[in-house]
């Protein structure tokens, strides 16, 4: 059993079945000490799996213990919200299960050492589709490098127990830093979920005079977030 009392064992089953809290297969295990091996969270029979890079320092903490629960996770949640995807229906994990200090990229031997944890999760869940988030996930899932070239493309990979469709896209942290790429990640998500077109509801109001402008201005002042297109 892992460090925390699991809120919902239906989502946290991999902590008991797959995680190795004593793992020292690479240098990250001993550095993470009792916070090592953060496996994925989500239903055991999920149709969809998301694979990120590695847990951040927040994700590994005893009171959190959940991939994508920091800033990248908030951003991922926004995308999921926009697409009406229920996060609790998706199994979400990472390419490696330990936190690399200072969020550095995982190294080749660390990815190799952690591969059996990733494969074990994939072969237990047997998802129909896997979405890789970022270049590290692309490498871990397909062996390919260069997310810019391979994003949005379909792969079919045999992992032994299952042969899911794999699509990779940019990492949410990259989109946070370079928001102009949001349409790209959004398009890749749409492709992944098999949506035929945009599913965001639009509600347009033309502004033709000053009083309409002032009305809009008042309404926007009450909004937590505003986005605009030039
Ligand atoms: N948190 C995760 O769990 N994975 C990432 O790749 C980034 C943040």
Image (cartoon, rainbow, N blue to C red):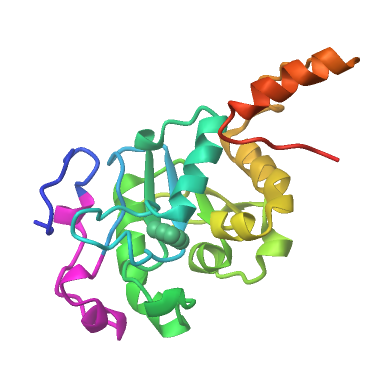
Q: Is residue 5 above or below residue 110?
A: above
Instruction: Residue at 16% x, 69% y: name it.
Output: 21
Which stretch appears magenta? 14-37
Instruction: Residue at 55% x, 39% y: name it.
Output: 79
Residue 207 seen in the current view: no
Q: Is residue 122 above or below residue 230?
A: below
- Residue 119 among magenta residues: no
- Residue 27 among magenta residues: yes
Q: Is residue 23 left or right of residue 172?
A: left
Instruction: Give the image quarter of residue 222.
Output: top right
Q: Position of residue 181 (x, y in %)?
A: 71, 52
Foreground residue among 134 and 117:
134
In which quadrant of the rendered image does the C terminus lie?
top right
Instruction: Give the image quarter of residue 83.
Output: top right
Foreground residue among 230 and 214:
214
Q: Is residue 87 left or right of residue 3?
A: right
In which quadrant of the rendered image does the N terminus lie?
bottom left
Instruction: Give the image quarter of residue 121.
Output: bottom left
Foreground residue among 223 and 4:
223
């Amino acid at each position: 059993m892992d460090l925390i009392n699991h809120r919902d064992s239906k989502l946290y089953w991999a902590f008991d079945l797959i995680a190795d809290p004593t793992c020292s297969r690479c240098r990250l295990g001993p550095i993470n000490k009792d916070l090592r091996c953060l496996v994925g969270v989500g239903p055991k029979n999920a149709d969809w799996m998301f694979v990120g890079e590695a847990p951040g320092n927040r994700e590994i903490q005893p009171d959190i213990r959940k991939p994508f629960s920091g800033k990248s996770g908030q951003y991922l949640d926004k995308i999921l919200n926009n697409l009406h995807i229920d996060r609790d229906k998706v199994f979400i994990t990472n390419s490696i299960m330990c936190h690399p200090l200072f969020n550095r990229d995982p190294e080749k031997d660390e990815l190799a050492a952690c591969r059996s944890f990733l494969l074990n999760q994939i072969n237990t869940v047997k998802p129909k589709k896997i979405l890789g988030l970022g270049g590290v996930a692309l490498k871990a899932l397909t062996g390919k490098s260069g997310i810019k070239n391979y994003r949005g493309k379909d792969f079919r990979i045999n992992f032994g127990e299952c042969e899911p469709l794999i699509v990779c896209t940019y990492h949410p942290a990259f989109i946070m830093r370079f928001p102009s790429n949001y349409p790209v990640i959004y398009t890749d998500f749409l492709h992944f979920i098999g949506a035929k077109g945009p599913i965001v509801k639009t509600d347009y109001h033309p502004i033709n005079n000053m009083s309409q402008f002032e009305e809009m201005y008042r309404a926007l002042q009450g909004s937590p977030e505003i986005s605009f297109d030039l």
